[in-house]
Amino acid sequence: MMNDIHSAEAENPIPPLAELPTERPAGCPFDPPAEFARLREEQPLRPMLYPGPDGHVGWLATSHALVREVLADPRFSTRPELVHWPLPGPAAEYQAPPAEPGMFLRMDAPEHTRYRRLLAGKFTTRRMRLLTERVEQVTAERLDAMERLGPDVDLFQEFALPIPAQMMCELLGVPYEDREFFERQAIATNDNSQGPEAQFAAYAELQKFLKELVLAKRAEPTDDVLSELTDSDLTDEELTNIGALLLGAGFDTTANMIGLSVFALLSHPEQLAALKTEPDLTDRAVEELLRYLTITHTGLRTALEDVELGGQLVKAGDTVTLAAGAANRDPEKYPDPDTLDIRRQAAGQLTFGHGIHQCLGQHLARVEVGVALRELFARFPALRLAVPAEEVPLRTDSDFYGVKSLPVTW
């Protein structure tokens, strides 16, 4: 049996990929790199050369089953000091240190478990219900603003960005008058096109702001998650990093998801027509858009011990890059996966991850996207792109895929 298992360093290995595929097919802004489909069919777990100075040969996983399996397996670590970066550039040359206190997404159990347990109790059904009402109010306010500005607006700047920005401000108790600063720093930390120095500078500014906010919450708590966490045994450093993590995870991601979803629906008029005539399809449409668009590019895990995975031997220390976009387009999981079908049952999509690191705020994100889409097309049924689809600028140099702007008219 073991003779049939191959490692990335075996004498006669499967030829490793020279690099991670990143080029999306021309004219198909919603599709992942075409190379993923071929790799998934031929060899869904493929050795891959990582661009760092040590010449690491790890793996690329492209099937839904394998990506889900790795995400659920505690033998794979998310610790930054263990993973190899799969893309060329400064990040590949940089040896990341261990996660700072509070950065629980980059920790394994039991450290991760402590933080996750504390935070899970703050994302209660009651709070999510109250936040749903606020999402509806905030969405209506943004639609009113669009109507005053219209009919020609940048939907990303006037609609997709402000909704999650305000919701995250309220969830963590960030004064709304600081929204523009918050937006600017949060986006800059994820913008790879500006270079690492600019990203680090933006993150430092965000950290400074959040540290001051934590001190303010300790002195005068309000009705928000950050204030409630000051009653725990968490230090100021831990609270500051948790705040930065939640802001980064719940703002830029959702803004890009709203913007790209509107673009996708405007580019698929038959799907948009179905959503307009059957608003009860909204929840199913959101799940399908999460699957179809997959705004998160890849995930990374490193084996803590030798693991048999998909007939291959992944050795301790091997990094596995998880192609979420390829997994969400796997025909073994979703028939006709390259077709957007808002009537599809897209349960099991991996955009929010899986396992112990699955997104804490996924319910709020679904609500924000669903309310935004339903109310937008109810208010502006004649909404359409104001430029040809091929002229919509896309965010290809960011940790999250989306649109830089979305000019629309009605």
Image: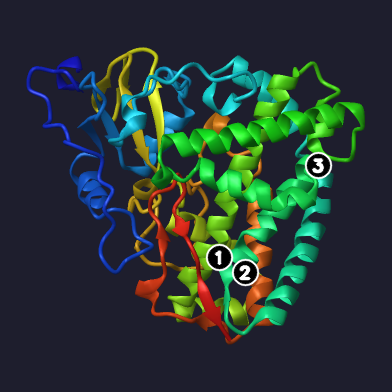
Label 1: state its secondary structure: helix
Label 3: state its secondary structure: loop
Question: In the rendered structure, which amino acid carries the disc numbered 3?
Answer: Gly
Front residue of 345/25: it is 25
Q: How is the image coloured?
A: rainbow
Quarter of the figure that contains the N terminus:
top left
Q: Which residue is mark 1?
A: 285
Tag 2: Cα neighbours inside 10 Å, few (<14), some, or many (≥20)? Answer: many
Q: Residue at x 40, y 50 (%)?
A: 328
Question: In the rendered structure, which amino acid carries the disc numbered 2?
Answer: Leu
Q: Position of residue 259 (x, y in %)?
A: 54, 64
Mark 2 → mark 1, Cα distance in angstroms: 10 Å
Q: Which residue is mark 3?
A: 173
* CB under 8 Å between discs 2 and 1: yes
Identify the residue at the far left of this view: 12
Q: Which quadrant of the figure has residue 268? A: bottom left
Q: Residue at x 68, y 23 (%)?
A: 115
